[in-house]
Image (spheres, rainbow, N blue to C red):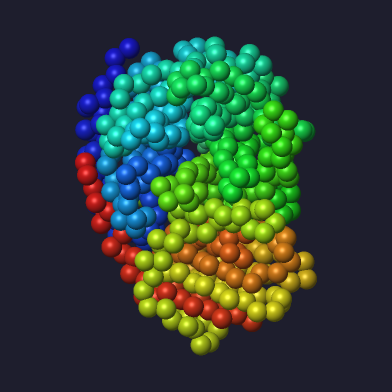
Amino acid sequence: MVYNTIQDNEKIKKLEQIHMARVSHTDSALSFHLMPPSGWLNDPNGLCQLHGTYHIFFQYSPYSAIGEGDKYWGHYETKDFINYTYTGIFLSPDCDLDKDGVYSGSAFVEDDTMYLYYTGNTMEDGDFDFTYEGRGSNTTLVTSKDGITASAKKCLLTSADYPHTLSCHVRDPKVFKENGKYYMVLGARTRNDVGCVLLYEAEDKEHFRFKQYITSEKPFGYMWECPDLFRIDGNRFLSISPQGIAAEEYQYQNVYQSGYYRILGDLEDYTLSPFIEWDMGFDFYAPQSFIDESGRRILIGWMGIGDIEYENPTVAEGWQHTLTVPRELTLDASGDICQNPVKELTALRKDAVIIPSDHFLTEGAFEMLADISGNEDFSIIIDKGMQILYDAGTSVLSLSFLPDRECNPEDAKGCGRCIRRAKIRENKVSSLQILVDHSTIEIFVNNGHYVFSSRYYKTGHAHTVEFSGDMNITVYTPVSYTHLRAHETTLHL
Ligand code: FRU
């Protein structure tokens, strides 16, 4: 088979230049979130920091806003999570190992080098279901010093190496080191449709041996994607993105989930705590975390999900999806993980305005802090169509949209998104930090105990916010994030 990557990459560069120029001033283009330079973006990949620079790779279909075609890895870098440089395609599906997609993976940094592990997806010719037959998943390694040039690809494991109880769905390696040994987790679906994680062990960074399965006591979905095994303050957590979980009123409301277990005991003899969802909004999936050079654990998620029933009208403009802002993970007193925007983002704040009344108007991206006293019902209505409601009687916080047909063009539209609810464990909402970036909203509740991440759409850049309840509101406005809008992100093509 002949692969034509140089021409392919030249074609993508041109496409990206044209696309970025075309969409940068549209109503939905983002100021401080990473958009695909063209087409479709999904999972964050290979997150790490090396010599002060953060590397954010991502799953990328440059030719198609609906994610058709084979996946590539694109690459953004930043030193401060404010100024980003897009450096172009890092990995292409250009050889027998990954001819049908350079799928998700992670970075492990050692010896001043990024070791980047990913799944090379291959599909056999023929009439296969590609779940139980016909698909290959090659765990592959490349190294890089800069996120721009990759070494030759080296296959570490093929489908023949995984336990034979598994279906063809085995992917998304995440590598870490503990006590001088290297470990890798892979997400998997068994042949009888149970989601699980495979744990591998190695003395070096290449020769991984299967060690054990990690899974829930009772089956929890048919497939676990994008696993991440990490510690915070010595406590071990397993993050997964499970598929096949039935929706409940206050949990698992999206088509696919993502969340974490706390691992109690040793890995050889573990129990898993109850599963906690990372995010309660409409658009969040496949997050990945990493430790930066200052020791912070930072999580970035895909602000999107596959197979959703709702829509993103940016498809008509030739792009779809974004990543969340980077979130620092810390533990609260009860051992649950809190997620808060990394402190670097406060550099985006301009004049703080304390709102003296029950509403305000603003223009463009903005941040809003609500300090809530007492424990009463409250509501915040953004752009007439999007509502954050708290019912103190039931401790339920919800994010909902009016039906699109009841909205004017300049009102917030959910484009098929209806309602997401969270039952607040602490039975009280005392603070909200809300980031609005043209077509995204992220709501951090009670210092990051809960987060709701969602897309929403409207015409124009003017916002109205109306609220009721006992709260003090501070707005960072005018927040001129506009220097970050995609067109002004440095393009290094
Ligand atoms: C999660 C996922 C991964 C896979 C990648 C392909 O969204 O399905 O499991 O590696 O996307 O783009």
Q: Residue furthest front?
A: 179
Q: Quadrant of residue 432?
A: bottom right
Residue drawn 70% across and 50% down? 251
Is 427 left or right of 40, judged from the image as shown?
right
> In which quadrant of the rendered image does the N terminus lie?
top left
**Residue at point 27%, 31% (across, down):** 149
| Figure quadrant of the C terminus | top left
> Is residue 138 something that shows in the picture?
no
Please tell me which residue is depicted at 66% across the width and 69% down the height of the picture: 429
161 to the left or right of 389 = left
Q: Nearer the viewer, residue 410 or 110?
A: 110
Residue at (66% x, 16% y) in the render: 165
Residue 399 spot, x, y in % from top left = 61, 62
Q: Which of 53/249 is in front?
A: 53
Q: Is residue 8 visible?
A: yes
Question: Furthest-bottom residue in view?
Answer: 356
Residue 61 percent coordinates (x, y): 38, 36
Residue 4 is situated, as x and y percent measured from the top left of the image, at: 26, 21
Residue 5 drawn above or below residue 84: above
Residue 374 placement: quadrant: bottom right
Tell me residue 144's x, y (percent): 32, 31
Is residue 5 depicted above or below 78 in this figure? above
